[in-house]
Image: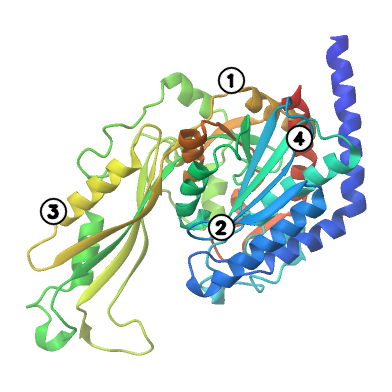
Amino acid sequence: MEQNNKQNSDAKQYLAEIRAYIEQNKDRFLEELFTLIRIPSISSEQEHKPDMVRCAERWRELLTAAGADRAEVMPTEGNPVVYGEKTIDPAKPTVLVYGHYDVMPVAPMVLWRTSPFEPVVKDGKIWARGADDDKGQSFMQAKAFEWMVRSGNLPCNVKFMLEGEEEIGSGSLYGFCEKNKELLKADIILVSDTSMIAPDVPSITSGLRGLCYWEVEVTGANHDLHSGLFGGAVANPINVLCKMIADLHDADGHITIPGFYDDVLVLSDEERALMAQAPFDEQAYKQELGVKALKGEKGYTTKERTGIRPCLDVCGIWGGYTGEGTKTVLPSKAYAKISTRLVANQDFEKISRQFQQYFESVAPDYVTVKVTPCHGGAAYVAPLELKAYRAAENAMQQVYGRRPIPTRSGGSIPIVAGFEKILGLKSILMGFGLATDDIHAPNENYPLEQFFHGIETIPLFYRYFAE
């Protein structure tokens, strides 16, 4: 008991020193973060290719200033990787910090209340694209590292790997990891790119869903037709595509692709009961989203549907005339972007093939269907018994005053499963975002409180992990 009291006392003193440093430097922290946010590093848009390099170079400068002994921009087949390191003792453990500097597109611009790449602090939040995902969260890692270096409290070796393709599947990073296994040797990977349950309910993401993504093209006639002269006699690809998409689910919300659920890992009643302990106000959830009712797979709760069950969604659909006014056209083609979120044991490459074969096979004779796989990745689960998980748990408890709850995230970071396969390393997903941060949507934001709490928590993780 006496030893535990001393450890808690030491941790409180440690935390007080971090908080004092943050208070002295918070304005500088924000301005440095804003230099990253102002660079429109949208990886999915070719016109922003130069911005990817600019953002990588800026990260290199910031890591050097924070205390890295080595920081460089390394080429890949796609966007560059920013690598940094500081070695204090080769015999000590090494933490590899992963993050990404690319961001999602900002459309539709009309819905933004502020300029997406000109950060604004209002109502206690940073408003901008990348404020949370993932510039803000990755930057917490850099500033926590800075404090540890400058105060002489860095207890282990640190490596940084920041990529520019996470939002488009991390295609080049797999090859980068294969080529640089020696460079990336570590004991654990630390990731801040996930969310907590609530500002006063800390949680650690113990699992991520996997991902598959396709673009679908449905073709009817060989050119656009007059909807009056041909309507009712020639198939409309948009109508057909909508029907095909609707048929991908049955009345109970189950996905109808043959074999889709064959490898799904079903959690025990005990595990489901543990998950159910996480606080969740379904009425508040609906009010926040502005919906009257929720919809999903029958037999599962809302949290289970987004954490331990797979799903399939249309991410975009278009075709025909969408300009101002009217144009009576029967379009030749219709398109959709479709994704699935996968759970433990599902092979994303197998699912990709299953979807393509099924969707093309059910196409009626009056259209032709082409399915193009885009990208994907496997699901990931972190055992709660990991030493690094316990370190993260203890760190969050010190800052938030309560033990964090393990959660399964509905989101995906496909490369995390890739790290385990290529580098043989587990990842700890210690993120500080909130569901209300609107990542990937207009008006992305990040509460300052969460940003600063992250900087407070991370050094404690290093301290407990090194012990």
Q: Judge depth for marks 4 and 2 and give the one in front.
A: 2
Query: Residue at the spot x=91%, y=30% of the render?
Result: 13
Q: Secondary structure at mark 3?
A: helix
Count neighbours of disc 3 (C-alpha within 10 A) and say few if under 14, some if 14 to 19, many if 20 or more.
few
Count neighbours of disc 1 (C-alpha within 10 A) and say few if under 14, some if 14 to 19, many if 20 or more.
few
Count neighbours of disc 4 (C-alpha within 10 A) and say few if under 14, some if 14 to 19, many if 20 or more.
some
| Quadrant assignment for the N terminus | top right
Q: Judge depth for marks 3 and 2 and give the one in front.
A: 2
- Give left or right: position of 204 versus 307: right
Q: Nearer the viewer, residue 459 or 326?
A: 459
Residue labelled with disc 4: 400
Residue labelled with disc 3: 361
Amino acid under disc 3 = Ser
Query: Residue at the spot x=90%, y=39% of the render?
Result: 151
Per the model, the C-alpha gap separating discs 1 and 3 is 45 Å
Count neighbours of disc 2 (C-alpha within 10 A) and say few if under 14, some if 14 to 19, many if 20 or more.
few
Residue labelled with disc 2: 75
First in sequence: mark 3 or mark 4?
3
Per the model, the C-alpha gap separating discs 4 and 1 is 21 Å
Q: Secondary structure at mark 2?
A: loop
Q: Nearer the viewer, residue 86 or 213?
A: 86
Q: Is residue 69 visible?
A: yes
Q: Judge depth for marks 3 and 4 and give the one in front.
A: 3
Per the model, the C-alpha gap separating discs 2 and 1 is 36 Å
Per the model, the C-alpha gap separating discs 3 and 4 is 53 Å
